[in-house]
Each structure stands twice: as C-alpha cells, then as structure tokens.
Amino acid sequence: MKTSLCIDSSTSTAWRLACAAALACGMLLAATGLRAQTLSSPLGAANPKSTAPAAPGLGLPVGQGAGVHGANSPFAPLSARDDVVPWSVLTAVKTKNEKNRILPVFTPPQLALNQTTQRIQGFMMPLDPGEKQRHFLLSSVPLTCAFCLPGGPESMVEVKTKTPVRYSMEPVVVEGRFLVLNDDAYGLYYRITDATSIK
C-alpha cells in the first residue's frame, strides 16, 4: 500500500532527508549497542497549545522554523562560540511561495556567507548508516524523535566532508566552503563542502 504526501516538494524532500537521518541514527545506535533515550518534545513548553504541522495522512510533525531545544532534552544546548556562524543568522531567512514550491529569500548577511570558508556548530543527523559519516546534516537543535524534523530547512546545513567524521550525539563543528542555495532540488538552504572536523 502506497501513501502519497501532498506537501510542496522542498518540504517533502527535506522531510525525507531528515527521516533518512533519523533512520540512520537509529541503525547506528542499534549497531553500537546504545540504548534508546526518551527525548524532549519538539514543541516549546511555554506554549502547550502550539502544534507542529503534520504530514498529511501520516500524523507526523513536519519541521518548520528555527527549531526548539526542549527544556527536557538530555542534550545541552549549543555553547556560544565566536568562531562559528551563529544559527540566529541562518534561521533569519524569509520564504516566498512560487507555484508549488516554497523558496528562501535570503538577507544580505546570509548572502555574504556564500562561497566563503565558514565554521558551523550543530548536532549531527547522519544520512547513511555507519560509525563514520561523509555526508550528513547539521541541525541547530538535536533530534527529538526518530521521525520528527527538529526544525525547517533554515535550521539545517548539509555537510559533505573531505574525510569521514565520527558520529557523535554531542555537538560537532565543521569548517568548509559555505554555499547559500537559492533553489536546491532537495529543499535545503545551506551546504558546506570539502568540510573538515574542528575541535
């Protein structure tokens, strides 16, 4: 039985990428023998009436916005660092509807990052199973459940590394060539290529 989602292509693709990341994360945890942890709700405790939009027909939350690091999360929020691009800059992007797509409208500070060497700090969302990753997403907040997006595409950066990076549930920092994506086929807004892991 096939289920068809009726959401715009950029949200659908970002949702599939995050589901792949969550699945890979679960497979990695199972392979390494780690026990599953109960994570916090993706919704902020300050507004219990808020709900994330659900993927039609599935009842699963679809990420949007900057994401919320829940107060009950077992993971500490990202520590402030002067040597990384702040997530507040990346998540300040606006969007516009164009035909059946939602496209980003970048601000001058975001556009100034394009084609420059930058550092980003975030939580890994693997896209493949395995202890070491060469292609993954970095998120401003940790995953809150196996099938939930932590936020929208503005809260994630696609990372392609020169050498594999060991998966970690702790925040990681990568440095590489930063790209601002105006109309990415996968619905992503940012990418870092030729990245290396930074301590």
Image (cartoon, rainbow, N blue to C red):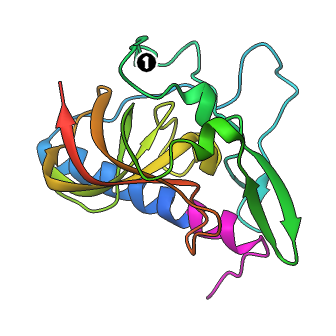
Q: Could you say where residue 81 lies in the image, as x and y percent from the top left?
A: 39, 14
Q: Quadrant of residue 88?
A: top right
> Where residue 21 sits: x, y (%)?
40, 55
Q: Secondary structure at mark 1?
A: loop
Residue lying at 71% horizontally and 48% vertically, measured from the top left: 106
Q: Is residue 103 left or right of residue 159?
A: right
| Residue at 65% across, 47% down | 152
Report whether 60 appears left or right of 194: right
Q: Amino acid at mark 1?
A: Leu
Asked if residue 81 is positioned above or below residue 177 in the image, the reply reads above
Q: Is residue 185 visible?
A: yes
Left/right placement of residue 48 relative to residue 42 reads right
Which image quarter is the C terminus in? top left
Q: Which residue is mark 1?
A: 78
Q: Is residue 159 above or below residue 57?
A: above
Query: Is the N terminus in the top left, top right, bottom left or bottom right quadrant?
Result: bottom right
Pick the residue in front: 59 or 91: 91
Residue drawn where x is 28% and y is 31% of the image? 172
- Residue range of the region highlighted in magenta in the rendering: 1-15
Residue 3 on the magenta segment: yes
The quarter of the displayed image where residue 60 is located: bottom right
Q: Position of residue 64 (x, y in %)?
A: 71, 45
Query: Viewer-proximal residue, 92 or 10?
Result: 92
